[in-house]
Amino acid sequence: MIDTSSLSAQSHQLLALHTAPTLLKVVNVWDAISARVVSEVQGVTALATASHSIAAAYGYEDGENIPVELMIEAIGTIVSATELPVTADLEAGYGNPGETTRMAIQVGAVGANLEDQLKPLPEAVAAVEAVLGAGQAEGIDFVLNARTDAFVKAGDRPHADVLVDAIERGKAYLAAGAPVVFVPGKVSEDDIKAFVDAWGPQKLTLIGAPGSVPLARMEELGVARVSYGPFSQSVALMALQDLTTEIIGGGALPADFRVLN
């Protein structure tokens, strides 16, 4: 049995972190040890899972190829490794956004990302409503980070058209009750200004990537949150591969090595 009062308190805490003028920075995690290590860093206030990273850890390709039960189990393991509120990447909801959200709440998640995959807008809005309805049925104000894939699936469309589409979709998700909208992809400072003008401050969430607008500037512009998706796992795996290269070449552990587990 989940402790509804505890989850409700965590959901309010997570929402407050998104609505505060201070940019919420979340480094995505994928298992118990990554959750624990990130949680222990001073200043970390919430955790976010990365579906791509969890799938990779189990040997699956990204894109809802991992069984939903295994993804939910991984989310529960992460929740159990921290006292911080956890928001989960639920991809597009695994065919049933409401039920998948209910399952995530049952293992302790109090927020989630949900991809629209550029589905017809009424269908995408219905999925947002299903997620929020699942939260209400479980007795919490679930913090949905409604994702539009307008930028990541832009293809050869003119940028102006892509921006208009993303803004329209975001408005619809906010009107349906989502507190924030996630726009992954290459987003410029002018794009950020357009989103904030259209939706208001602390409604936009972004992904940090090489070449992204600096975090301090994101905060100045009114961005609610920045996350790092699979990039955090890639950094960890690069460090592991670099260590392996060093050892195979006759080297040693780095001088500043420390045990984190």
Image (spheres, rainbow, N blue to C red):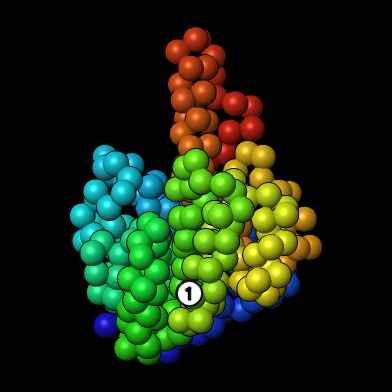
Q: Whole-percent x and y of residue 236? A: 50, 38
Residue appearing at x 33%, y 42% in the figure:
56
State which quadrant residue 115 falls in: bottom left
Most foreground residue, 206 or 107:
206
Q: Whole-percent x and y of residue 258? A: 57, 38
Most foreground residue, 30 or 89:
89
Residue appearing at x 42%, y 89% in the figure:
5
Q: Whole-percent x and y of residue 39? A: 54, 59
| Residue 31 drawn above or below residue 247 | below
Looking at this view, name the residue that lies furthest to the top: 249
Q: Secondary structure at mark 1?
A: helix
Q: Is residue 10 left or right of residue 123?
A: right
Q: Which residue is mark 1?
A: 173
Residue appearing at x 24%, y 50% in the figure:
66
Please tell me how crowded label 1 is: few (under 14), some (14-19), or many (20+) other residues with Cα within 10 Å: many
Three-letter amino acid code of the residue under disc 1: Tyr
| Residue 176 drawn above or below residue 254 | below
Q: Is residue 75 visible?
A: no
State which quadrant residue 198 falls in: bottom right
Residue appearing at x 52%, y 17% in the figure:
246
Q: Quadrant of the N terminus?
A: bottom left
Q: Is residue 234 visible?
A: yes
Q: Whole-percent x and y of residue 190? A: 72, 54
Q: Is residue 70 left or right of residue 116?
A: left
What is the count of numbered marks?
A: 1
Q: Is residue 69 left or right of residue 177?
A: left
Q: Is residue 102 left or right of residue 153?
A: left
